[in-house]
Every structure is written in C-alpha cells, then in structure tokens.
Image (cartoon, rainbow, N blue to C red):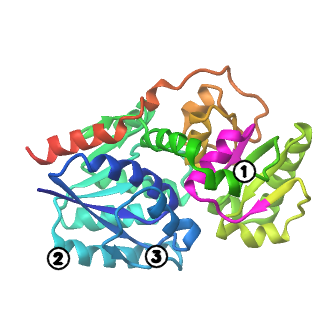
Amino acid sequence: MLKIHTILGARPQFVKAGAFSRALKKHPNVKETIIHTGQHFDTNMSDVFFKELDIPKPQYCLNINSGSHGQMTGRMLEGIEAILQVDKPDAVLVYGDTNSTLAGALSASKLHIPVIHIEAGLRSFNRKMPEEINRILTDHVSDYLFCPTQTAVDNLHNEAIKNGVYHVGDIMYDATLYAMDYIKTNFSILQKLKGLPSEFAFMTMHRAESTENMEEFQAMMDYVLDFAKDHDLKIIFPVHPRTKALVQKAQLDDTFIILEPLSYFETQYCLSKARFVLTDSGGLQKEAYFHRVPCITLRQETEWVETIECGWNRLWRNPLYNERKCIHEYGIGNTSEDIIYATKKELLL
C-alpha cells in the first residue's frame, strides 16, 4: 500500500484535490491522507468545497489562518512535521504556490520524504509576489514535479531542475470538465443564481498586491467600471474576505453586483454565462479559457503566458488581444490519471 499525505489549505487546492482524489478511488493500492492547514477556513472558502467536490474528509485540521506569512508558514511547518514524523508516509503531495504548499514541501524534505508538486514550474518572474517565492522554493525541494505546460518544464530546466519533471497537462481542466457536467443538471445552482443579469462580466480579486493599496485598488475598479460601461455590462463580483474592507471604502456604483464568495460550482456556472472574466487569480484565467470566455488579468504579469500568447487573455493595461488559438498543451482532461501513473511508477520501483 502506497501512503500519500496531501497538504491542502486554500480554495484552488481544493479544486485540484477534488479531481485527483476522485481519480485515486480507482487505485485501491494508494491511500491518501489529507492534512488541512486551515489557510482558508470559513464555510464558503473551505467546507463547501469538500462537500461539493467529494474530497475525503481531512484526517488532520491545523486551523492556522491568521498572522504574517512567516508566522503562518512557521506554524504550518511545525504542525505538518509532527504529523509526518508519526505517520511516515511514502510521499507528501502539494499543490500550487500557497504558504501551505511551501510548509508541506519543506516539512517533508527535511524528513527525507519524497515531495510531489502538482502545478510545478510556473513563474511570473515577479519576486514581490509571495506566491512566486513559494513556487520557486517548493520546486527546488521537490522530487517529482508535474508541470501543466512546456513553458513550466522549460522554466525548471533553466533552473537546473531536470530529474523527475513531467509535462502532464493541467489538472484544472480535469476539474472543469467535471464541473461542466455537474452544472448542467443541478437545479439548486440555477435557482440560486436565476437573478443574474443577461449580460455580465465575472470578476474576482484577492491577491495581496491587488488589495494592500487603496489607490491601486481604486484604479483597477475605475478601469473595470469604464470597461463595463463601454460593453454595456454588469459586473458580478463575489468578494473575497481579504477584499471586503476595500470594497466598502471604494467608489462603486450599481454596475457592480456584490456577492458573498461563491461555491466552486456556482463560480463555474457564472463563468459559463459570462461575456468576459476580470481577475487577478491564476486559476480563473485558465478556467475562463476552458469555458472559452475572454479574460482580462488585473495584474502586471501572469504565469499563464500561453493564455495571452493564444489570445484568450490580456493584462489590463494592454488594450489588445493576440490572435485567438486553442491551447493544446493543457491536455485532454486525464491529467490526474497521468500523475497517479507516474507517481506509482516512481515510488513503487
């Protein structure tokens, strides 16, 4: 029996874990144990995802969700290490680029437990982003690195990381295909969101660099408002807890329809109906493409460069899209199975 401990903490990780955990059910010789750091902790940001996405209930909940980056990462390191020392798993699996990701990877590597990093190799080349530091450090202590794109593979090679590197496509596409089927037949979502305007753009904003400066936040809101008026659209804006105080201070009019955070499937439904997506989220940039909805990224750069190269995305200060093309390297929706196959091959040698 292969024992894998998965570290989760934030909303995007729950979505990826849903796809991976569903695929794992076909492999009875692999046992997954979930450690939830508590980084996203309220019902709309955490509990609902485990219910909706059929993720196994976490065996461990650390409830670490406040403090500076250093405080949170240190407390997570301590909590995860204590669990790993007792359980002695065959590998630790981490997703993406959060403090939970880095804490899980460091804890495992210091105990000489192999680290599996899903969504490895992404780079924004902006080290002011905490996510960029987390990505780089996690990749450099990981043993098996599963990349969504060839660009991610090239980034790792440029940093002299060549062993254990796989290009498997994007696990978020697995999750989105599952969601597309789900929202077609789930009438509770249709009922809850039946009051949406017929023409709207869907917007999210949560990153530290977007929300730590009121002047910059207001500048982006002004841009979004002008964009909406130019296209005769309303803006559906589910507000992240980090952003709530800024929204209350900002000068917004009734173009913005402010909502509480949405569940994963509610978000997918909105994406499927939107004319545009405006976001600072990496995951939503790709999900917009999966739904074939043009995206505007409210940042100065993006790690998902192929969405811009292929004309489905642009940075907000750039008014033009490239010519639109399909992004084939995200795969066909079997990324989870490919990762499981490669992991079993590596660890069961």
Residue located beneath label 1 in the image? 203
Give the CA separation, mark 3 to mark 1.
28 Å
Tag 3: residue type? Answer: Met
Q: Which residues are magenta?
A: 258-279
Give the CA separation, mark 1 to mark 2.
43 Å
Q: Is residue 300 visible?
A: no
* Magenta run includes residue 260: yes
Label 1 environment density (alpha carbons within 10 Å; few <14, some 14–19, many ≥20): many
Note whether 174 is above or below 88 in the view shown. Answer: above
Residue 288 lies left or right of residue 341; in this view the side is right
The answer to which image quadrant residue 276 occupies is top right
Residue 176 lies left or right of residue 231; in this view the side is left
Q: Please name which of the two marks, 2 or 3, marks the residue nearer to the observer.
A: 2
Residue located beneath label 2 in the image? 86
Q: Residue at x 29, y 55 (%)?
A: 141
Q: Please name which of the two marks, 3 or 1, marks the residue nearer to the observer.
A: 1
Secondary structure under the numbered disc 2 in the rendered image? helix
Image disc number at residue 258? none
